[in-house]
Amino acid sequence: MDANKKENPLYEQFDRVYDLMKKYDAVLSLGNGIRAGAIHDSHDRAQMAEMIINCELAELGREKGCQMMVEGLGHVPLDEIEGNIMLEKRMSGNAPYYVSIFLMKF
């Protein structure tokens, strides 16, 4: 994207993505690409900007009749989880929300 001076093609053509999701009655999962490396950098500027964009895309998709869900931020301190969920639910118009987790089996 830097070399071509263009935005992500999926982002530029998101209306087409919405059309496909609606046509095939599919659910679009808006995931994260800018996850914090550790709890000490949770809610940094890049991560919050991505959350805002994902929530905006979820709202637009729902307005177009698409089924949308939003992935929550990762590597968040325990005392920030509830506030983070409330913020993202409010920003996304109460879109279904999920958090990717690593499950360990002992």
Image (spheres, rainbow, N blue to C red):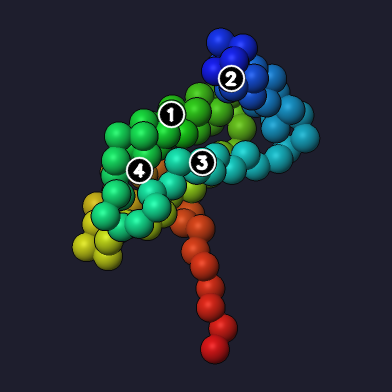
Image location of residue 34, percent across then percent down: 45, 41
Dot 2 or dot 1: first in sequence order is 2
Q: Residue furthest left?
A: 79
Q: Amino acid at mark 3?
A: Gly
In the image: residue 15, left or right of residue 69:
right
Q: Quadrant of the C terminus?
A: bottom right
Q: Assign a secondary structure to mark 4.
A: helix
Q: CA distance from mark 1 to mark 3?
A: 12 Å
CB contact under 8 Å: marks 2 and 1 = no
* Residue that appears at 46% across and 56% down: 99
Q: Give the numbered dot on residue 33.
A: 3
Q: CA distance from mark 3 to mark 4?
A: 16 Å
Question: Can you tell which of label 2 and label 1 is closer to the viewer?
Answer: 2
Label drawn at residue 53: 1
Label 1: element kind: helix
Q: Three-letter amino acid code at disc 4?
A: Glu
For residue 88, the mark is 4
How busy is the neighbourhood of tag 1: few (under 14 within 10 Å), some, or many (20 plus)? Answer: some
Q: Is residue 2 visible?
A: yes
Closer to viewer: mark 3 or mark 2: 2
Given the image, on which type of amino acid does mark 1 rest? Answer: Ile
Gap in Å between the C-alphas at discs 2 and 1?
Answer: 18 Å
Residue extending farthest to the top is 5
> Could you tell which of marks 3 and 2 lies nearer the N-terminus?
2
Which mark is first along the chain, 1 or 4?
1
Q: Quadrant of residue 8?
A: top right
Residue marked by disc 2:
1
Taking 87 as reference, is 29 left or right? right
Q: Horizontal and vertical percent for residue 42? A: 30, 50
Vertical placement of 13 versus 77: above or below? above
**How dense is the environment of label 2, judged by Cα within 10 Å: few (below 14), some, or many (20 and up)?**
few
Of callouts 1 and 3, which one flags the residue occurring earlier in the amino acid sequence?
Answer: 3
